[in-house]
Image (cartoon, helix red, strand yellow):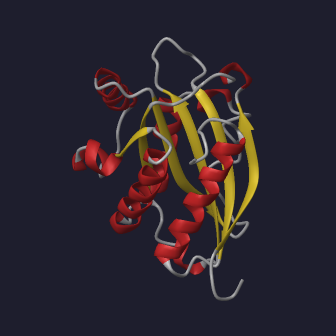
Amino acid sequence: MTSCSSVRLTESWRNPEYQEFKPKNMLIVGVTSDLEARAAFEFELMNALNARKINALQSTVVFETSFQDSKQTEADIKKQVELLLSKGYDTILVSLVKGMDGNQSFSSESPKIDYHLRRFIPYYLLYQEAYFKQEYYNDYKVLNIEASMYNLKKDKEKTLVWFGTYDLVNPNDITKTINTYVKGVIRSLEKERLISKVK
């Protein structure tokens, strides 16, 4: 525990309405103002998903810098979702740091409990604050991270497919930490049968 990072799944929930859901074209969004960490996380997860026959792409490639680096309204996010749909995306996976070491988090409710967060647009609208308020993360040794998968199809009201929360212990080396976390997310998605294992 003192020499390398470790990841612990603390909660996992799958929407029972999506028992047969299999993502095909997925956008990966890492919510952090650390450009290096965001690009590295998205690239690592993209490669892991591509190896499982899922066409995954990074938000750092798809989103314009102006969308990522400024606060967006609900209309702005809806417009972006419409653009993603027009390009064939059916799924979006968002990951963000919710809190640290048991201290105050950005939300006391999980998306499973809070109905309004079961859809991607309200979720992104709320948690974009995390992007702009991360300066105090460096003081902590345990990061509480959440990953959420949404179905982007616009005819669905409850679009949250799955979410999981993780504790990342001793996140000192960014490369090792990202690798450990991505492996944890992949294990969760395999266990929930949302993705296939590599043969």
Where's residue 148, x and y in %?
Answer: 58, 41
Question: Is residue 157 at least partly visible in the picture?
Answer: yes
Q: Residue furthest bottom?
A: 3
* Total residue callouts: 0
Taking the image as shown, residue 34 lies to the left or right of residue 147, namely left
Q: Nearer the viewer, residue 132 or 58?
A: 58
Q: Residue furthest right?
A: 10
- Identified at 47% across, 31% down, the residue is 91
Q: Is residue 140 above or below residue 180?
A: below
The quadrant in which residue 171 appears is bottom right
Where's residue 153, x and y in %?
Answer: 46, 19
Where's residue 101, x and y in %?
Answer: 70, 70
Question: Is residue 106 at least partly visible in the picture?
Answer: no
- Identified at 62% across, 35% down, the residue is 194
- Identified at 52% across, 75% down, the residue is 176
Quadrant where the image shows the N terminus: bottom right
Q: Is residue 138 above or below residue 144?
A: below
